Structures are given as structure tokens and as C-alpha cells.
Image (cartoon, helix red, strand yellow):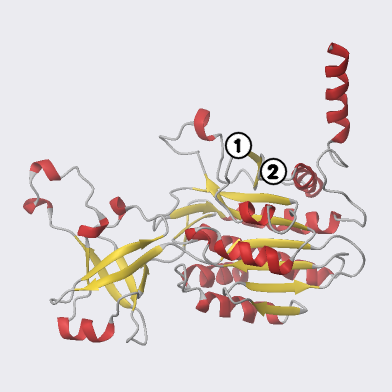
Amino acid sequence: MNKQDRKYLKRLLETPSPTGCEQRIAAMVRERMEGVADRVTTDVMGSVHARLAGKGVAPSLMLAAHMDEIGLMVVNVSDDGFLSVAAIGGVDAAILPGLRVDVHASGAERPLRGVVGRKPIHLISAGERDKVTPLSDLVIDLGLPAKKVKRLVKVGDAITFGVGFERFGKNMGVSRAFDDKCGVWVITRVLEELAAAGDCAGDVTCACTVQEEIGTRGAITSAFGVRPDVAVAFDVTHATDYPGISHAKFGDIKCGGGPVIGRGPNVNPQVFERLVQAAKTVGIPYQIEALPGHSGTDAWPIQVSRSGIPTGLVSVPLRYMHTPTEVICLDDLDATVALFVQFARDLESGCSFVPMAGYGSASLDACFARTTQGE
């Protein structure tokens, strides 16, 4: 990843976009895509669709990644100026005490710095020290007079973790909101690569979706509106390469091991095979993740939109998901861009995504033949 690409990733990660408040990052994506895509639109939900027209005849492709991040929301401003909050998305109350946050106050021109307060250990009874303080019992201190807090902060204002992007170790990155702004980086970079090469036969739409963290809501409307012939969602998945994670339960997924290709009922088998083949063609390492049920990603609603859309899922391994210190290997992002570019180029006129047709059918036919012979 070169310096300019890292700068773009940093801007994405540090642009606040808690679920329901994605407007700033949407504007950034639109600006980035205006000179790349043939058409850039925003739907009524707030998702951004950047379409690159194909140069020939091939299935239309949608690449999806969500722009929103987890956060907090103000539910009350006390008489003495402290904020009570609720979670936006899956926030772990255990990580919050002592954290610095940015309060995106309605009455302020820029975010207000706040801290999540908790009684010091000296004032906590022995029986309470090992317990997680419920989110409803935590407060945010803005360090301002109560009158000013009440004037600036309104119920419903959003709050994000007050940290940004850093590189560390051997080409590793740490930040809040890699889930899933690194995906926005990936799919917009793919569109830039395809536009520069000008050799993609089918239309490609980059769908930067909203409200994934509270139920993949933006992907529902994007899939319906874009109506692609085939789609691949991008998200992060749990890395299992650090202590305390069971490989027997969660698989063996490593940061730096390459993109993770999902396999299971949420993934069309032909799309899966094509993704694997694309990885082999470009010579990048890849990993496979078992998805026996709900993937918890945008791939879930896309797959069942309209009469069904053949859908794939690619992720990058992420340590410490939904914390202020999410960690990825930057090499995995570059590898995923190469994978998606090749996948898009490999789509040809007349290819079928009906299960048991095209890719993988020979092995299935052989399996059925053996079963018949056994009878």
C-alpha cells in the first residue's frame, strides 16, 4: 500500500460515521468516485452507488461494503452536565470505562472531547471491582459547565471512540472502525483499478451501504435498487491468531494470511469457486471460512433480494472486533483489491450461477454417480 492509499484509508477511518449518521463519509466517497465512475448516486437510505459501465457483455457485478461504525447515542443530559448513553450497534460496556470519546454535538461546530467516567478503584467495594459496569450506569464527562453542555448537546447526538489510525509492527494497522471502512477502501480502490485499465466487460457498481451494524438495512435497499446479476459483499471477520481463541470452534484465520473467502449457505457455490480461482490466478494467498448459517454481513440480505442474487462474501481477518483497537494486516487489503479486480474481469457472457451448473458440477456429478452405484 503506497503513501497516498494509506492517506485515503486514514481519512475513511477517522471520518465519523456512526450508524444513522453516515453523511460525512458518504460525501467523501462521492467526491472520490466522481472522477472514476460513470454515475454516482445516493439512495434515500443514504447508501452511495458508484457505477462503472462495462466495455462489453457480461453479468453486472455489485461490490458491497458498509460505511457505518458502532458508537453511542446520548439519551439524557443531567442537570449537572453529564451524559447518559445507549449503544449504537454491538458495543461492549466492559471496554468503555476510561475511554476518550468524541461527542458530535448538535450545537457545536466540531466534536467535543469527552471521557467515560467510572469511580476509581479506591472508591469501589471489593465485591464490585470484578464486575462490568452496565452501560446505563456509565456517564460521559465533557469537562464543561452544565449550562454549556445543555446548550450544545441534544438527546440523540452520536458519539464515536476518540481514536484514529496508526501503523505498527510489521505492516499492521490499528484503528477504530476497520469494521467496515477498510471494506469501503477496498471496493472503491477496485473501481479505480478497473476504470484505469478499462478492460471490464460488465457493469460494476460499488455499493457503500449504511446501517449494517443494526441489521444490514442499507444492503437490503441497495440490492433491490441496483439489481445486479451477481454480488460480492466485503466485511471483516474474526482473526483467531491470538491467545484464547479456539480453532476448533472458530477456525484458523490469520492476519496476513490473505483474504478470507466465505463458504456456506449464504454463499453461491459458483461465486465461491470463481473467487477461489481468481485468487489462484493472481497468485495471492487466501483462506476459507465456514459459514453454516447467518453470516451477519451484507451478504445475507443481498442473497435473497428480489428473486435471488448469486452472492459471495470476502473478508479480511480482524483482531479485537468492535473495540477502539481493531487490528488488521494492511497486506490483506491490497490482496483483496487484486482478488476483486480479477473476479470482475473473469465474468463472461452466458456464465451461470445456478447451483450445480458451471463450476464444480463435475465433482458433484461424480458424487451422485458413486451414490447411484452404491444403491
First in residue order: circle 2 vs circle 1: 2
Q: Nearer the viewer, residue 238 or 77?
A: 77
Residue drawn where x is 63% and y is 66% of the image: 221
Near-viewer residue (153 or 160): 153
Number of other residues with Cα within 10 Å of mark 2, as a class: few under 14, some 14 to 19, many 20 or more:
some
Residue 126 drawn at (x, y percent) = 9, 42
Quarter of image, res 252:
top right
Name the element at disc 2: loop
Q: Is residue 11 above or below residue 135?
A: below
Q: Is residue 40 visible?
A: yes
Vertical position of residue 291 compared to residue 101: above or below: above
Quadrant that contains the N terminus: bottom right
Say which residue appears at 46% left-offset and 74% top-offset: 21
Q: Which residue is mark 2?
A: 285
Residue 233, which numbered label? none
Residue tagged 1: 292
Q: CA distance from mark 2 to mark 1?
A: 23 Å
- Labelled pair 2, 1 in contact (Cβ < 8 Å): no
Q: What x and y, as percent, mark residue 279? A: 75, 47
Please tell me whether mark 1 sits on a helix, a strand or a loop.
Answer: loop
For the C terminus, the image quarter is top right
